[in-house]
Image: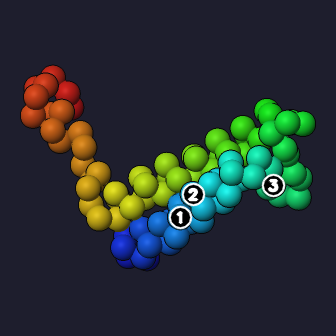
Amino acid sequence: MPPAFIAAVFGCLGLAAIRASGKSISSGTASSGGWTCTLDDNPVGFCLIISMRAAIVGFAIAEILYGVRAGRRPHRAHQARAAFLP
């Protein structure tokens, strides 16, 4: 698949995760995979759901940057600065 298509798919997933996290934080109730956690009753589960959605957003950003070739060869700049790197 072309990198631009992958970037678009993960961009949509990231936007969905941002929207779901915003709604969950504003309501105080997060649900995922059939179980629901409220901020008052189960704060650890609530934070776990929100942190997993944040990880999805981070992965989506990484895929978008890879798709537009922003993060293609980041070690090349380090090789120019440090001659001892292979």
The mark found on residue 67 in the picture is none
The kind of residue tagged 1 is Leu
CB of mark 2 within 8 Å of CB of mark 3? no
The kind of residue tagged 3 is Ser
| Residue where numbered disc 3 is placed | 31
Query: Marks 1 and 3, Cα distance to the nearest angstrom?
Result: 17 Å
Q: Helix or strand or loop: what does disc 3 sit on?
A: strand
* Dot 3 alpha-carbon crowd within 10 angstroms: few under 14, some 14 to 19, many 20 or more: some
* Dot 1 alpha-carbon crowd within 10 angstroms: few under 14, some 14 to 19, many 20 or more: some
In the rendered image, the quadrant that contains the C terminus is top left
> Residue at image x 89%, y 53%?
35
Out of 26 and 24, give the one closest to the viewer: 26
Q: Is residue 84 above or below residue 31?
A: above
Which of the 4 quarters of the picture holds residue 85? top left
Q: How is the image coloured?
A: rainbow
Query: Marks 2 and 3, Cα distance to the nearest angstrom?
Result: 14 Å
CB of mark 1 within 8 Å of CB of mark 2? yes
The kind of residue tagged 2 is Ile
Location of residue 10 in the rendering, given as x and y in whole percent from the top left corner: 50, 65
Q: Helix or strand or loop: what does disc 1 sit on?
A: helix
The mark found on residue 18 in the picture is 2
- Quick check: 75 left or right of 66? left
| Residue where numbered disc 1 is placed | 15
